[in-house]
């Protein structure tokens, strides 16, 4: 068994520690890319030669027919990142090669960040920290607990469903909008389904967990943002493209609600973007997913799927060809 890690040296060392490589070596011979930077097609072809399993990550280009011709025994591609769109080609599916990604591992970090935003925002900590730093001592009149409030979750993919799981530790009403989740499935998760407009009008916190697709582009438009309650908190740890930022800035200037934005369109936002100066915006530089030690969770998921593959078990991160149009 040959396992080829195709990503560049720096990227591999960020994600995979010695313990992960040692576990992979128990499954077969491991070949790593020792060159700097993103691999070229020629480098991919050389690295993947005669491999049974290939491991890709950020910076890896598409696995073209030329690359795959070098690995006629290839049976599995493990993507140590989120979206597999940068590496998947029709030839992969045509040759019956299975594909798995680390979206679930990334989703855990995103959900945890969204929960952190939820707690801090309801506690009004952003304002109170600013006031106390400037010499004041806020009265806490706007502080709310994560108790007896309605939390609206938009999208129940890996991140959204894990956010719901975390919220179940609190005494809150969880409502969900996701057209691909049925009422009974939502109930089993611990949520109650609503249509999007009702969710926006009723929720005290709205957390967005949507992929960037043509169908979700500017889903949060002027009309829908206007439905949101005063004193609501909107959290976006998904993709900047799902919000009409001009319309959001207009609503925020009214001071009606608070926004926690980990993503924008584009990234970073321009230096004079209103999100950088409005007092009711918490803007973070796309840190909700795996950063630093969190990247090791991705390596762990890759190793677990490799071991499951060898044992003939289901792959936690498997992606099918018919799912591609729904993925970020």
Image (cartoon, grey):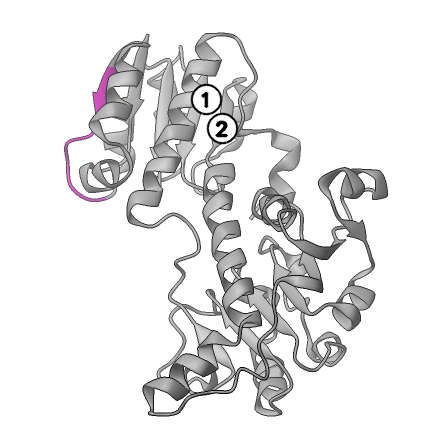
Calculate the distance from the C-alpha at mark 2 to the C-alpha at mark 1.
8 Å
Residue 210, quarter of the rendered image: bottom right
Q: In the displayed structure, does residue 88 sit left or right of residue 68?
A: right
In the image, taking residue 64 as reference, residue 40 lies left or right, namely left
Quarter-wise, where is residue 64 in the image? top left
- Looking at the figure, which quarter contains the N terminus? top left
> Taking the image as drawn, is residue 64 in sight?
no
Whole-percent x, y for residue 279 in the image: 47, 86
Residue 305, label in figure: 1
Q: State the residue position of label 2.
A: 100
Disc 2 element: strand
- Against 27, residue 47 (above or below) is below
Looking at the image, residue 324 sits to the left or right of residue 262; the answer is right
The image shows residue 82, relative to residue 312, as above or below, that is below
The magenta span reads 30-37
Closer to the chain start, of discs 2 and 1, is: 2
The one of 221 and 61 positioned closer to us in this rendering: 221
Total tally of numbered discs in the picture = 2
What is the magenta segment's predominant secondary structure?
loop
Give neighbour class at mark 1: few <14, some 14-19, many 20+ (Cα, 10 Å): many
Indicate which label's residue lies in the foreground, 2 or 1. 1
Marks 2 & 1, CB-CB < 8 Å contact: yes
Quadrant of the rendered structure where residue 258 is? bottom right
Residue at far left of view: 35
Camera-nearest residue between 8 and 172 = 172
Name the element at disc 1.
helix
Q: Residue 297, relative to residue 167: is it above or below?
A: above
């Amino acid at each position: 068994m040959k396992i080829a890690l195709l990503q560049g040296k720096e990227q591999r060392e960020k994600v995979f520690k010695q313990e992960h490589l040692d576990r992979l070596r128990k499954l077969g011979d491991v070949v790593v890319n020792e060159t700097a930077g993103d691999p070229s097609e020629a480098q991919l072809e050389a690295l993947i030669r005669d491999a049974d399993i290939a491991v890709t990550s950020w910076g890896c280009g598409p696995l073209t027919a030329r690359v795959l011709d070098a690995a006629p025994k290839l049976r599995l591609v493990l993507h140590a990142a989120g979206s597999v769109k940068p590496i998947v080609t029709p030839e992969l599916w045509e040759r019956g090669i299975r594909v798995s990604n680390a979206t679930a591992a990334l989703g855990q970090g995103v959900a945890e960040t969204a929960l952190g935003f939820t707690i801090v925002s309801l506690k009004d900590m952003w304002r109170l920290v600013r006031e106390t730093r400037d010499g004041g001592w806020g009265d806490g009149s706007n502080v709310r607990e994560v108790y007896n409030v309605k939390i609206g979750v938009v999208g129940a993919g890996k991140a959204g469903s894990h956010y719901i799981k975390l919220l179940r530790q609190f005494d809150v009403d969880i409502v969900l909008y996701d057209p691909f989740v049925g009422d009974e499935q939502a109930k089993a998760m611990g949520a109650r389904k609503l249509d999007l407009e009702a969710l926006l009008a009723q929720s005290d916190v709205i957390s967005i967990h949507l992929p960037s697709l043509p169908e979700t582009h500017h889903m949060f438009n002027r009309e829908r943002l206007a439905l949101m309650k005063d004193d609501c908190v909107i959290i976006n740890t998904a993709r900047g493209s799902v919000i009409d930022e001009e319309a959001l800035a207009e609503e925020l200037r009214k001071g009606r609600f608070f926004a926690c934005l980990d993503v924008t369109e584009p990234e970073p936002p321009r230096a004079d973007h209103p999100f950088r100066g409005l007092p009711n915006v918490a803007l973070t530089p796309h840190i909700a997913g795996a950063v630093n030690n969190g990247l090791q969770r991705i390596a762990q998921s890759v190793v677990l799927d490799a071991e499951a593959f060898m044992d003939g078990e289901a792959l936690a991160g498997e992606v099918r060809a018919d799912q591609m149009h729904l993925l970020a």
